[in-house]
Image (tube, rainbow, N blue to C red):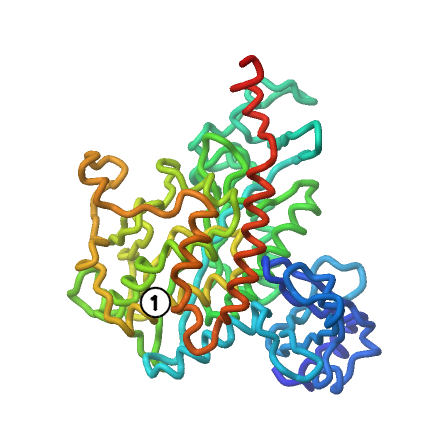
Amino acid sequence: MSVQNVLDNIKENSIQFVDFRFVDLLGHAHHITLPATEVDADTFVNGVAFDGSSIHGFRGIENSDMVMMPDTESVFIDPFTTHPTLNVMCNIYTPDGERYDRDPRSIAQKAEEFLQTTGIGTSAFFAPEPEFFIFDEVRYESSMNASSYVVESEEAAWNTNRKEEGGNLGSKIPVKGGYVPVAPVDSQQDLRSEMVRLLQESGLRVERHHHEVATAGQAEINFRFDTLTKTADNLMKFKYIIHNTARQYGKTATFMPKPLFGDNGSGMHVHTSIFNGDSPLFYDKGAYANLSELAMHYIGGVLYHAPALIAITNPSTNSFKRLVPGYEAPVNLVFSKGNRSAAIRIPIAAVTPKGCRIEFRTPDNTANPYLAFAAMLLAGLDGIKRKLDPVALGYGPFDKNIYELPEEEKKEIRSVPGTLDEALNALEADSAFLTEGGVFTQEFIENYVAIKRAEAKAVAIRIHPHEFSLYYDC
C-alpha cells in the first residue's frame, strides 16, 4: 500500500486519529496517537518522535530521542476505539536515519534480507498456533508480606460445587477434558466467533477456532501463514484483538504459558517453510515425511541450536512451568512425523507440496514474535549451511510416544533446558548463528540476556506461597 493509499483510506473511512505503534524488546506494543489532520505524506518520510529512554531495554536518558517510521503495509482500522482510528506498525530509527539495532521489527526484516543473500530461497513462511486462556477474573499480589494469585472461570473443574446466582448449571470442563467439546460444555463459542469476526475485519485470514484441552477456558484460533515480518505483525494484531474482545465481554484473556497448576499450558507451535519464488523447498515426495534434504538440514539446525534458541522462543520463568514432561509439553529435542511428544513435528495429514512444513512445538506466547521467528530462521539456515543431519546427530526420527519409552531409551534423548537461566547460559555459549549477516548484534544479545537474567533473579528471590506449606512448621 502506498502512502497515498493510506491517506485515501483516512479520508474514505472518515478516520479521526492515526495510531503509530512499535514493539519493545519484550514483545509489548506501545503507541502514540496523532489527529488525522496532523498526518500527511511528510509524516511517512519524517516519522514520529518518541522518548526511547522510557522503553525498557532501549536507550539511556542521555541519548533518548528516537523515531518511529510507519510501514504502510501494516495498517488496519482499530475495531475498539470510539473515534475511528487507523493503526500502523512502525520501525524504529535513530535521529541520524539509521535503523535501530535493538528494534525487534528491524531484526525480523534483516533476517528476511539475510535469507535472500544466502541464495537458498527468497521467502520464509511462518504460521503460529497461539493458545490462550479466557478467564472470568484474575487477581494477583507480590509484596513484602504477601504473595498470591487467583483465577476464576465458570467452566473450571474446581467450580462443580460453586454456588452461583440462578444455580449451578453444571457442564464444567474436567482437567485435560476440554478438547473440542460442544456447547454447553464449551461456553465460549460465541466469544471466539466474535474474535474471529474482528480478526477477519482487520485483514487476517482465519482458518478455524476451537476449545483447547485444559479446563477453565483454554482456546485456540489459527490464522493463515505469511512471510516472517508480516506474520509477526499479524500476531501482534491477533493478541490485541483477543485481549480487547475478551474485555468487551467482561472477561480477561492471557497468553501466559502456565497459568494453571496441574493442567495443560498454552504454547505457540510454529509452522515454518522456505520457498524459492513459488517453489517449495521442503518437499521431496517419497522421502521421510516427504521432507527434502534441505528441510532435514533445517531441522538439524533448529534442534542443534535449540537450547540457545529457547532463551528467545520461551523467554520467561513461567515458560519452564509448561516445559515439563506430561501435559503434552514438547520437551524432547527430536523430530517425528505426526508425533506431538517431539519438539519438531512434521504434519503429514492433507499436506500438499506447498503445504509441506515443519512444526516447532516448543515456543510459547511470552516470546517476542519478531525475535523468535528471526532466531528460528537463522538456526535453520545454519543447519542448511553446515549440512547438519538430524538423524546422524541423534535427533530421531522418533515415531513412538516418547513419554512411554523405557528409561534407558529416554536417557538418549536430549531435553530442553530446565530453567530460564539454563537457556540463557546456552544462548551465551551459542550465539554466533544469530549474528550471521548482522541480523542480531552481540550487543543486542548481551542486553537481552541481562534483562532476562534480572527477570529470573526477581522470581528466584521471592518467597513462593507453596514454601509456607512445605516449611512453615520446620
Which residue is nearer to you in this view: 473 or 52? 473
Q: Position of residue 128 (x, y in %)?
A: 45, 58
Position above or below: 204 against 413:
below
Residue beneath disc 1: 380
Which residue is nearer to you in this view: 331 or 229? 331
Position above or below: 38 against 196:
below
Which residue is at the far left? 286
Q: Quadrant of residue 427?
A: bottom left
User: Circle 1 — which element?
Assistant: helix
Residue at the location (60% across, 52% down)? Answer: 195
Q: Residues within 10 Å of mark 1 (few under 14, many from 20)?
A: many
Q: Is 355 left, or right, of 62 in this rendering?
A: left
Q: Is 345 left, or right, of 202 in this rendering?
A: left
Q: Is 283 left, or right, of 202 in this rendering?
A: left
Q: Quadrant of residue 412?
A: top left
Q: Position of residue 368 (x, y in %)?
A: 54, 59
Which residue is nearer to you in this view: 446 or 36? 446
- Total numbered circles: 1
Q: Position of residue 130 (x, y in %)?
A: 49, 52
Residue at the location (65% across, 77% down)? Answer: 93
Q: Quadrant of the N terminus?
A: bottom right
Q: Amino acid at mark 1?
A: Gly
Residue at the location (24% across, 65% down)? Answer: 296
Q: Position of residue 378 (x, y in %)?
A: 39, 69
Q: Quadrant of residue 11?
A: bottom right
Position above or below: 260 against 293:
above
